[in-house]
Amino acid sequence: MRKTHHFLFAILISAILFTPATAQKLNGNATAAAKSAANAPLKLTLPMKDGSVKFAVIGDTGSGSERQRDVGEMMVKYHTLFPFEFVLMMGDNMYGGEAPQDFDKKFAEPYKALLDQKVKFYATLGNHDQPLQVNYTNFNMNGKEYYKFKKGNIAFYSLNSNYMDKKQVQWLEDELGRETAEWKVMFFHHPPYSSAKKHGSDGQLREVVEPIFLKYGVDVVLSGHDHVYERIKPQKGIYYFVSGAGGQLRAGDVDKQSGLTEKSYDQDMHFMLFEVVGNQMYFQAISRTGETIDSGVITRK
Amino acid sequence: MKKKTYIIIGVLVCLLILASGVAVGQKTQNAALAEPVVVSPADKAAIDVFEKEVKDYIALRNKVRENAPKLSKDSTPEQINAYRTALELSLRNARPNAKRGEFFRPETADFIRRTLKTEFQGQDRKELREQIFETELKGVVLRVNYPYAQAAELSEMPATLLTKLPQLPKELRYRFVGRNMLLVDRESNVILDFMPDALP
């Protein structure tokens, strides 16, 4: 009899908790919490030195979702504190169709305020991106699937990790062979190292590119594909970051037992800020709601 | 005396194991530069025929492209869309009788299948297969002279495999759809040919 009372009481509580009105209220509270966090004071951990190279990183952005817009808005807020000159995009710039309206919804609108302030975006191709994106003026790829550009003492190389053929490997070797910049930063979609359970480390890509990175002294490798944030423990002296949650999130996807992780975050979307001062590269990873989820400095040897 | 001998043997065994480990590591790292599968004179002839077909297609493509709208490196989404649509239609109209097996002829297909088998064998290549099969292929219909669905995901072509397949000009791409291997026109996404069940 007492057991029956307990059972009925449990059913009653469950019914109250799961009425649409209560669910809405709970959702409302979650949204309110997110909004309140979004209004939290901005915190910059970067040194903000005159003459430094300042840039941002976003990955796997092109969902056109409200949360992608939230990340875009947070980037605008941080831009007022930290006026980054350009943004590196880690690929999957557009999920689904690529009709003209998709370019607006999934890119031009979420980052309109930054584009209006002449912030340049440099894209790389992901597995959801059609090859003709290389001709899109706002992606600054100059019609090329792989390309490089320099800013200050840094050379940035965008690679097409969807299709790493002999020609691209040769181009990379040739360019790195005559590179004079102090910092060599690679960015491409598939991560050579990752602790995410969905995709994880791209071993066959690593087999081809890592020996080249080591031979020519590449310092930092940025990628996306896994919808999480991860800073990998330095591998053979190279620093690897996975930044693939600028518009998509795979919550709880990081395998904490991988042994690769220095720091990870898989609870919300994020973007990154970087500042290079001489032989030091400062970084800060920031969540959609403005929390600093990681920060630090890399010193080039 | 006996104990000392055992210690020396133990140290030597450890050194041998370490040395073999380094050798294996080096082999893995240099895999990209490794020689492709054995190419017999018959394979060479098949590859030559394949390359000739590709060359003829590029000549036709260049001619067709002259009539498509021009595309600059600073294009708008509307210009990109107009170019892709026009190119796709023109290429399809230029090859109305295109059919499967025109590029992947039996001899070429045989060479490619053997190359794939070699590349995908072994426990350490399990991840490679999984990577290809995890690609989302909703909406993809395999039909020669028809486009690959624009909204569909593109599978990553394994870098180690690309070094071993016949090289393609920048206008063409190999692509996997499940176990099938495709040859596609890169810009228009038109499927030029495909090999069913190419992956072992």
Image (cartoon, coloured by chain):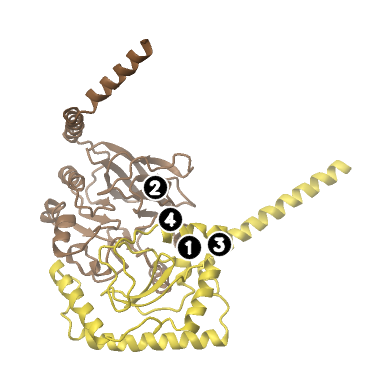
**Is disc 4 in contact with disc 3, using a CB cutoff of under 8 Å?**
no
Image position, residue B89 (x, y; %): 21, 79
In this rendering, the label closer to the viewer, 3 or 1: 3
Name the one closer to the observer, A139 or B68.
B68
Q: Which mark is residue A299?
A: 2
Q: Name the residue under label 4.
A: A192
Visual hue assigned to chain B: yellow
**Amino acid type of the residue that numbered disc 4 sits on in the rendered structure:** Pro
Whichever of callouts 2 and 4 sits on the residue coming sooner in the sequence is 4
Q: Measured along the vertical axis of the image, is residue A133 above or below residue A83?
A: below
The image quadrant that residue B159 belongs to is: bottom left
Q: Which mark is residue A89?
A: none
Q: Measured along the vertical axis of the image, is residue A64 above or below residue A177?
A: above
**Is disc 1 in contact with disc 4, using a CB cutoff of under 8 Å?**
no
**Is disc 2 in contact with disc 4, using a CB cutoff of under 8 Å?**
no
Task: Estimate the spatial distance between the alpha carbons at disc 1 and disc 4, rounded to whole Å.
Answer: 16 Å
User: Residue A300, can we see it?
Assistant: no
Visual hue assigned to chain A: brown
